[in-house]
Amino acid sequence: MALNRNGSPQGSVSKRTVTAKGDIIAATANSTVASLPVGADGTTLVADSSAATGLRYQANFAAGKNAIINGGFDIWQRGTSGFTTTDTYTADRWKVYLGGAGTVSQDTSLVATGSQYAARITSNSAGFVGGVYQSIETSNALLLAGKTVTVSVLIAGTVGKTANINIATSTSTDVAPFGSWTALLDSGPLTVSGSFTKFSATATIPSSAKSVRIGIGTSGSLASTEFLTFDQVQLEIGSVATPFSRAGGTLQGELAACQRYYYSTATGSDNYSYFGIGQAISSSAAKLAFPFPVRMRISPTSVVQTGNIGCLNSGNTAINNGTVTVEWSSNNLASLNITSTSGLTAGNATVVEGNNSATASLSFSAEL
Amino acid sequence: MENVKFIEIKNTLTGETQTHAIVTLSPDSYESMPKAEYDRRQAEQSTPNLAP
């Protein structure tokens, strides 16, 4: 066997090629090798023909790694401000707890790089505490059971104030955000500044867990006008916080993910937005089959009507206001009754539409 | 106290009458649901269970 001068077989690769933990040996050309230094924690090795070794580490932006829907606070179907009541949904999938007078609103002035919006919780009273919470439905939470997970979030706010990351679990199915939970982890005080800082917390989800909830909120209390702003919340398997990506991968994917839990027709571009073509069943009532854009988690049992909605009368001369109720529903559509209207002819088709109402909308919830 | 009224709607196909609760959310908005759902929600109202 022919040997090199150092005594190793000719053609072999010296172990001195690599110098640090995680380095790998890669070819740069025919019979030529080099060391590829290990990438940063959580990065992914990809092929790249422009790199000397044909390989490169890059941040992991894989869709679906984030178990938090609307972690970037992109979707606000319920409105963007004025959330002053505790135990109500704000940005899609996020429910607010307000301990004292406070409010949640969409933040457009203080947003993280790569985001268009964030969520701000503002104190309107002394000694205020609060936060936003999201529970993960069982079919998704089961994927986390027994796994080490990491929550990461960008937080900014009133300088020197403190925030907290909470992880809670339950052995029950599809627990609502303010149902019965067992606390798994509280990060403790995370001191914020006027610009975003990325904080993270890691814990192991019990193997018996069927529901998982994440909470981001105050640690200490806030005085009036003090605030915290949250953005790019992510829950992923592993012990490393990787760069944020939407659960749905794209904005339209994120919207669809949100609409599994809640759907609201956008307010129309005019005051007579159409909701569909129904059928009059009497002079004062009509039915409307109302399909949802996304198959919802469960069949919605209620409908929220905002603004004036009515039926176009048989003479095509007036829209008479009605009351909208759910006759029955499935995950895919609701059969709506429009009652207490007038001017209809049983058996005729009728347009169900806003009646000179800029705010006319219908909303359906399939939330936890 | 929330502003709620109840209305009865007859299903012209089956002849059954269903009672719906109409809960006023704001001057411009209300939520309607079968009375059974309204009763269920009333029974479930509880104190939020939040970690500090």
Image (cartoon, rainbow, N blue to C red):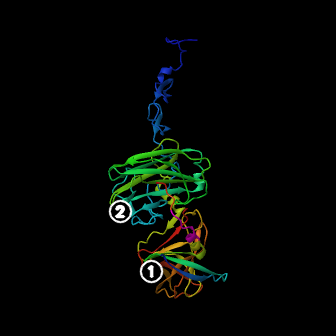
Is residue A198 highlighted in magenta? no
- Residue A159 lies, with reference to residue B3, above or below; the image says above
Q: Amino acid at mark 1?
A: Asn
Chain label for disc 2: A
Report x, y in % for residue A292.
Answer: 55, 67
Q: Element at badge 2?
A: loop
Residue A122: image tag = none
- Mark 1 vs 2: CB contact within 8 A: no
Q: In this view of the protein, which residue sits in the foreground, A360 or B36? A: B36
User: A227 left or right of A61?
Assistant: left
Report x, y in % for residue A206.
Answer: 59, 47
User: A119 left or right of A352?
Assistant: left
User: Could you classify mark 1 by the number of other residues whose Cα lies within 10 Å: few (under 14), some (14-19), or many (20 or more)?
Assistant: many
Q: Element at badge 1?
A: loop
Residue wearing tag 2: A125
Rounded to the nearest whole Å, what is the CA distance between mark 1 and mark 2?
40 Å
Q: In this view of the protein, which residue sits in the foreground, A364 or A309? A: A364
Q: How many marks?
A: 2
Q: Amino acid at mark 2?
A: Ser
Report the magenta residues as a range: B40-47
Residue A355: image tag = 1
x 56%, y 47%: residue = A205
